[in-house]
Amino acid sequence: MDKRDKYGVLIDIGRRRGLFWPSYEIYGGVAGLYDYGHVGVAIKRSLMENWVKYFVDRRDGVIVELESPIITPRIVLQASGHEENFTDPITECTKCGRVFRADHLVEEQTGIHAEGMSMDQLWEVMKKHGVKCPVCGGELTKPKPALLLFKTEIGPYKGSPGYLRPETAQGMFVSFKQVLNTARNKLPLGIAQIGKVGRNEISPRQGLMRLREFTIMEIEFFFDPDKADEEVRKYLTKEILEYKVNVLTGVDKKKGVEEAKPYTIKELIDKRIVTSPWMAYWMAIGNKYLESLGIPSQKIRFDEKLPEEKAHYSLQTFDQEVHTEKYGWVEVAGYSYRTTYDLGRHMKYSGADLTVFRRYSEPRIVEKIKVYPNPSRIREIAGKDLSIVMKNLSKIPSEELVEKLEMQGYVEVEGYKLGKDAFYIKKVREKIHGEKFIPHVVEPSFGLERIFYVVLENSLVFEEDRTYLRLDKKLAPYHVAVYPLVTGSTGKPSMIAEKARLLARALRIAGLRVFYDEEGSIGRRYMRGDEIGIPYAVTVDYQTLEDSTVTIRDRDTRKQERVKIIELYGRLLELLGLAHDWKDIIQRYSLI
Amino acid sequence: MDKRDKYGVLIDIGRRRGLFWPSYEIYGGVAGLYDYGHVGVAIKRSLMENWVKYFVDRRDGVIVELESPIITPRIVLQASGHEENFTDPITECTKCGRVFRADHLVEEQTGIHAEGMSMDQLWEVMKKHGVKCPVCGGELTKPKPALLLFKTEIGPYKGSPGYLRPETAQGMFVSFKQVLNTARNKLPLGIAQIGKVGRNEISPRQGLMRLREFTIMEIEFFFDPDKADEEVRKYLTKEILEYKVNVLTGVDKKKGVEEAKPYTIKELIDKRIVTSPWMAYWMAIGNKYLESLGIPSQKIRFDEKLPEEKAHYSLQTFDQEVHTEKYGWVEVAGYSYRTTYDLGRHMKYSGADLTVFRRYSEPRIVEKIKVYPNPSRIREIAGKDLSIVMKNLSKIPSEELVEKLEMQGYVEVEGYKLGKDAFYIKKVREKIHGEKFIPHVVEPSFGLERIFYVVLENSLVFEEDRTYLRLDKKLAPYHVAVYPLVTGSTGKPSMIAEKARLLARALRIAGLRVFYDEEGSIGRRYMRGDEIGIPYAVTVDYQTLEDSTVTIRDRDTRKQERVKIIELYGRLLELLGLAHDWKDIIQRYSLI
């Protein structure tokens, strides 16, 4: 097996072939910010398109998309708890002034697991083990929490603070009712969003793994907790129930177990390893998704977060991790059971009603106290103001009248105090058709750039004479490369190059993403195409001039086949998996 | 003609059907920020995909994409001149404290065109005409410039200020050499980017027309100014040269002309109305692009900006405007000739070499002065330090030695002053193969959300019994709607609904975006589909159960045709223009 460092090779290909490189390099760079070149943009776009197909288009209308702003007024992230909780502990060197993540320093210098420790706990460990500045050896200050939100001001006034969103989720919570009303009008409802977020990391040093600006692809899945078991059943097909995922449970972690174990989705639900069956469902879908990108199942696991590792909004969280050569297990997605936390907080902070009405299967009879004004007694009190008092009373809901009479013994209207004797008080039995409740939320959330990286690492293949990306065809930056065998300015070489250029253009017109290259030997061009994962290469050669045929070369097997130009497009669609066999599809769905 | 207010109808459809609505409404909203619902996201995505197809994929590899960060270190926007120039004049009410754009207030209250006026000029007019606070009538302060950049801090240190980018362009300039090296390695080269930007507008009140966060789709097109006339010729086909666009020239504007006049691209170049032929080329491509979205040519014009209306970086700018009912002429794109401004400034601020090498067609002979150290004279001066002095001298480029000898009469090395006599000075003739130069840049830049709005307005059709969006098929949020004629829980209605659901799923599997709806009468469902611009509706009815046929209804004509399910997919691809006729394409390109 080739022992080359895959990370190093990818960094090199990334820069040399236009996948990714650190931003603002002419100014010395800014940690945690990356550029993506034309190949990187194409692969990232393929990943996003594929995510939408997988998580939105194929979900029969249950998931709908939303785009909400990156710029977020402060109140939203106060309500969400981020302003209070979205912090990391930092410590500053008293000698050189550098700032570090205190928990990372502790782990590096003492080996003690420090995630989730309080400032005091960290300080204790730092003092006990003599943790020092890793750069100059200076003394460090007591850790304090640093807010990871990028702060700004909205508008020209001072005093309208805002933040860049650290997750797209709050957009879905804040606009939940608007989306519910326009999109599906019933639960369950998933709201999906792909968008940029900002996290002002302390000192990101892990390339694409820890970015200050990145893309989240996430779903807030709203459901009725009382109906979860019943509603999820339709989604839990036999195939899903028997599907296996690797899980490192919190219980096992506490016992010191470090290896994940395989569980079927059915086991996760029946053994109550997951606190909502919808979590188990989305974990299955998310696992199948990563497998569909070419990540082998044994390299994927779910790591249940312990109470001190979890975000403040979550009842239960599983990180979905992929094993990488450079960083070991890397989180590429998180599955959190956010319950009613976010909607509840936004109701409190905004005063808006974000509840949903749950209709009972049968109406229920409840006993209520109702009060009605007694006009003759009120006339005694209010005299000629009777009619205005009656009119104002009619505007006050019966519940409020009951409450006031109970709490303070009277209701005041137009300056008149109306005691209990001014009302008829009756117990009534009412038919109730349903009730309001705050939906629960399960959130599967994916980090695009991390998935981008793990897909690249998993695609990278070293062979004796070449290094190439065995990218899944649907993720490739280009569908096909077109190469003239030879190029020149006169004679047959020039005719071959011209034909190749026209063929590239024709394939583009027909909707394919085409890479065209005429520089260097054909062997080197094949290698260059392989290196960025183009699955097929079409070569125009001398024979093309005679019989209008070209060759198609397969990136993985390097085998070639010769086809007529007129059949080329159909054959490419077939090879690329873009030719949908409608007859086959409708047979599967018994539509014929 | 229907006199309903299209803007009002679109706002209503936007909110009701999930296209767009103001963000953060439960918190009272934030001016200039909008949400896009599932239909809006789908249309915006279609617009972006289409833009990439049009401006990138179809340009034979000359245009490549880049994704660079939104978060930008301060130095970049100092170099670009934005920190100094990207401001609007604001004035504050001394009574109520509200802040306004001074130029807008002047225009509203005096009718005087105030764009580009200095703070002093605005203040003069305000005093002379008694401009007051439009809300409370209070006195206003002297205008001062307000920076339109969203400011933030990068990282936990104070003193690392950053901004949200106000344009994607700076990412292309800063990474120009990196992209050039990885992508095309020659000029002309266009770098395209679609991405979010932030502009901290003073008090945006124009809905989707003036946003604080929006999406830019722009190209920085780098070229060699000496070869522009020659290189552009390949792109200026007869069809392009004869193509007409409406232009309101700066010369005409100064004369008081308000109507644009039609010019062919050839005229724009020959009459030197545009300062670079590449500008004219991109204006043609951009005009064809808007036409391809369904905007009629007579509703599009180019408005040449006068010196006081232009951005600081531009030698010449044309706004591309579309006429709207609500706002009149609205800028949807800008075409600026940025020359060497940005690259030159970044060279100065970063010290990086952003030049490109221009190879001469034939080598040129130039005369140069060269100096060589005279060791025997230097030994007299430096004694035993001769070898270290000689070694250090060898590190100094000949040009620098010449310059120092000419300017100060000596060169100082290791403390020894070496005069002219310590060197042999010779005139030599050198063969030069080329020279370095800073590429020029033309920038076509499109505002996605404004195009989104003008496309919607232009698609909105009022008919007696319905209001619908005659969206171009390639921009529609869904390819097709599927409706069961009737629904029910038993018998044939239930069979019909089940078949319709399966058909919707089958079409999704085959790659189409499908809208499924079974609520309400079939007539109302047709109307609902029409209202969001779905071009075709497939209806499953009683006859489907008998002979496996369905109807396809055309949104615009409302005509229906009946097809067999097995032929449905092919027929839809054909109707949607998604079935590429490969034979026809290769015949056009003489590949057969």
Image: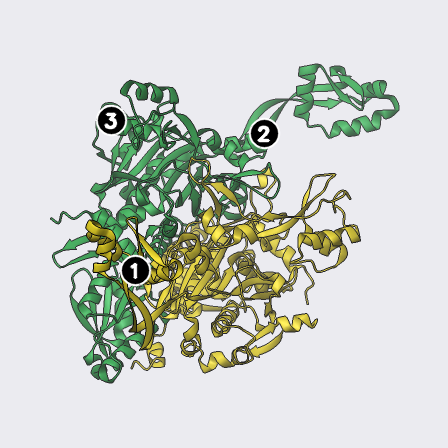
Chain colours: A green, B yellow
Residue at 35 percent across and 34 percent down: it is: A277
Along the viewing direction, whichever of B129 and B483 lies nearer the viewer: B129
Residue at 27 percent across and 20 percent down: it is: A129
Residue A197 visible from this viewpoint:
yes
Lateral position of residue A396 relative to residue B505, left or right: right
Image quarter in which the C terminus of chain B is found: bottom left
The disc numbered 2 marks a residue on which chain? Answer: A
The disc numbered 1 marks a residue on which chain? Answer: B
Report if the CB atoms under discs 1 and 3 are less than 8 Å apart. no
**Amino acid marked by disc 2:** Lys
Lateral position of residue B532 relative to residue B141, left or right: left
Q: Nearer the viewer, mark 1 or mark 2?
A: 1
Q: Secondary structure at mark 1?
A: loop
Image quarter in which the N terminus of chain B is found: bottom right
The circle drawn on residue A587 is none
Which residue is the extreme one toward the front?
B380
Lateral position of residue A462 relative to residue B49, left or right: left
Q: Earlier in the sequence, mark 3 or mark 2?
A: 3
Q: Secondary structure at mark 3?
A: loop
**Amino acid marked by disc 3:** Gly
Against A199, is B234 above or below?
A: below
Name the residue tied to disc 1: B397
**Amino acid marked by disc 1:** Pro
Query: To which quarter of the image does residue A568 belong?
Result: bottom left
Q: Residues within 10 Å of mark 1 (few under 14, many from 20)?
A: few
Lateral position of residue B99 relative to residue B357, left or right: right
Name the residue tied to disc 3: A111
Instruction: Give coordinates of residue A291: x percent, y percent.
Output: 26, 47
Instruction: Give coordinates of residue A452: x percent, y percent.
Output: 31, 49
Name the residue tied to disc 2: A431
